[in-house]
Image (tube, rainbow, N blue to C red):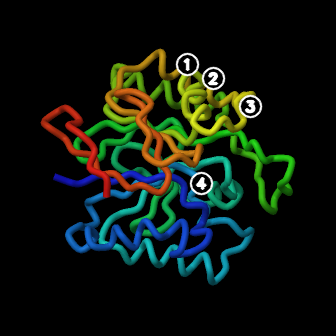
Amino acid sequence: MARIFITGDTHGGWGGFSHEMKRFSAFEKFANTLCKDDFLIILGDFGFIWQNAPDSEEAGWLKYFEDQNFTTLFIDGNHENFNRLNSYEISEFHGGKVHKISESIYHLMRGQVYELAGHKVLSMGGAASIDREYRTQNISWWEGENISEAELNEAYKNLAKHDFSVDLVLSHTAPNSIAPKVLALNEFALDFHDPNGDLLEEIYRKIKFKKWFFGHFHEELFCVNSQFITLWHDIVELKFDGEKIKHLCVI
């Protein structure tokens, strides 16, 4: 059975192996036991495709992931170069649409339902940038961070094929009934209203699911409740007991 690992934002490897990539140094001892049928999923703000034209730093980081034994999957966050991401060829992957970055790196597009390790997974990236005013359009911020009506409709169309029931939901931000419980951990931006959270709330109220993972808030492993979990540097492995998610193993 394929294995699934999940981690939070990587921000293009900011700070290298002393910061964002430090998690992967610890993870490498597991990588020797994995294969390309195993998946590492990054919950948005991937950031390794950032400059308006590919450069040597980007090539080096993408080669790092390509050379690993596992397959890297990522949803988009708000800090992404959407012009670049959307320029990649759209392919079919495990039942849903992806942008194929390389033979073993894929961007999981919004509103898709995939079958990974025998489990149904909904992807819904996107979030509003709280720091938008400090960024420059087409240099450090790009149009496309917010979930569109077409992407929401795509999610509903795909969910309908599965009777609005999935095993996992992967998003960057969280539904707006969940986000304040995370923000309250550090009392940061409690008054910031993200319209993407409203759309995720709508999805939340319509579907059945077992676990919902999200990043964005830069909080280490925090279980909001029995279903919602936020991640940043931690890497967790999902453990399955038949059709149920048994527990998380923190790497």
Which mark, residue 51?
Answer: none
* In this picture, residue 138 sits left or right of residue 188: right
The secondary element bearing badge 4 is classed as loop
Closer to us: 85 or 50: 50
- Tell me the distance, in whole angstroms, between the alpha carbons under discs 3 and 1: 19 Å
- Tell me the distance, in whole angstroms, between the alpha carbons under discs 3 and 2: 12 Å
Which residue lies under the disc numbered 4? 45
Mark 1 and mark 2 in contact? Answer it, CB < 8 Å.
yes
* In this picture, residue 28 sits left or right of residue 132: left
Choose the circle earlier in sequence order: 2 or 4. Answer: 4
x and y percentages locating residue 59 in the rendered image: 57, 79
Q: Amino acid at mark 4?
A: Asp
Q: Nearer the viewer, mark 3 or mark 1?
A: 3
Which residue lies under the disc numbered 3? 192
Q: Nearer the viewer, mark 3 or mark 2?
A: 3
Picture layout, residue 96 above or below residue 159: below
- Tell me the distance, in whole angstroms, between the alpha carbons under discs 3 and 4: 19 Å
Mark 1 is surrounded, within 10 Å at the Cα level, by few (under 14), some (14 to 19) or many (20 or more) other residues, namely some
Q: Quadrant of residue 137?
A: bottom right
Residue at 44% x, 64% y is: 105
Residue at 62% x, 41% y is: 126
Q: Quadrant of residue 190?
A: top right
